[in-house]
Image (cartoon, rainbow, N blue to C red):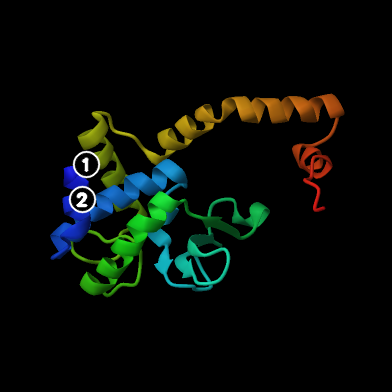
Amino acid sequence: KKELKHIMNNVASIKDLLRFQDLIIISLYYELPLRLDYASLKIGDANENCIYKNQKKPRGWHIRLQDFKTSKTMGQKIFKLKTTNQRLLNRFIPAVKKYTEHGYLLTNKNGQKMSRQVLSKTLMRITQKYVGKRFSTQLLRILYAMKSRDVIESAKEVSEKLLHSFEQSLQYAKKDSD
């Protein structure tokens, strides 16, 4: 905990930024286990994959994904980040803007935009360091799905009993707007 506070409060160089970035990567994957799309997030509200701060409701940091593996079938997705990541990003994004010029969320060792391949290697290095095992994005996504297994199975069971799709079940179970 002391190390985290020290990292967050003392970003005085690109090296410090990269240490803070390790914390950001772990925290983002814990909340939202995307593939390697974090490497393509531009800072600011752009018409592409981006991370931006909404000043109007819903306030806070959001991730907009327009170009991802299943974007043709799922369309654009917007995710509002939880409070923990909001606070981290409020300190991290200004540091990224101060020490880099590429305009993206993640930075490689040379101060340039981080590629997907480097993000994958970085994630495995961080998990090895803090957890003792190398975790890839695929494994993190599997673990996330396993954590949510009961919810997924009960939704599937309801859909099967009603003899229709999961989407139709959601439509039937729509919350009242009254």
Position of residue 54 in the picture relative to residue 75 (left or right)? left
Q: Position of residue 153 (x, y in %)?
A: 66, 25
Q: Please tell me which residue is depicted at 30% across the width and 59% down the height of the picture.
A: 114
Q: Position of residue 175 (x, y in %)?
A: 77, 46
Q: Please tell me which residue is depicted at 16% across the width and 58% down the height of the picture.
A: 16
Q: Which amino acid lies under the numbered mark 2 shown in the image of this protein?
A: Lys
Q: Please tell me which residue is depicted at 29% across the width and 69% down the height of the picture.
A: 94
> In this orientation, which residue lies closer to the viewer: 176 or 99?
176
**Relative to 46, is 164 above or below?**
above
Is the N terminus in the top left, top right, bottom left or bottom right quadrant? Answer: top left
Q: Which amino acid lies under the numbered mark 1 shown in the image of this protein?
A: Lys
Mark 2–mark 1 Cα distance, whole angstroms, equals: 6 Å
> In this orientation, which residue lies closer to the viewer: 90 or 30?
90
- SS for callout 1: loop
**Residue at the front extreme, as displayed:** 178
**Relative to 142, is 93 above or below?**
below
**Relative to 125, is 16 above or below?**
below
Residue placed under numbered mark 2 in the picture = 5
- SS for callout 2: helix
Q: Position of residue 17 (x, y in %)?
A: 20, 60
- Pointer 2 with pointer 1, Cβ within 8 A: yes
Q: Position of residue 39 (x, y in %)?
A: 38, 57
Q: Please tell me which residue is depicted at 46% across the width and 30% down the height of the picture.
A: 143
Position of residue 24 in the picture relative to residue 140 (left or right)? left
The image quadrant that residue 169 belongs to is top right
Position of residue 152 in the picture relative to residue 28 (left or right)? right
The image quadrant that residue 111 belongs to is bottom left
Whether residue 33 can be seen here: no
The image quadrant that residue 128 belongs to is top left
Whether residue 22 can be seen here: yes
> In this orientation, which residue lies closer to the viewer: 44 or 90?
90
Residue placed under numbered mark 1 in the picture = 1
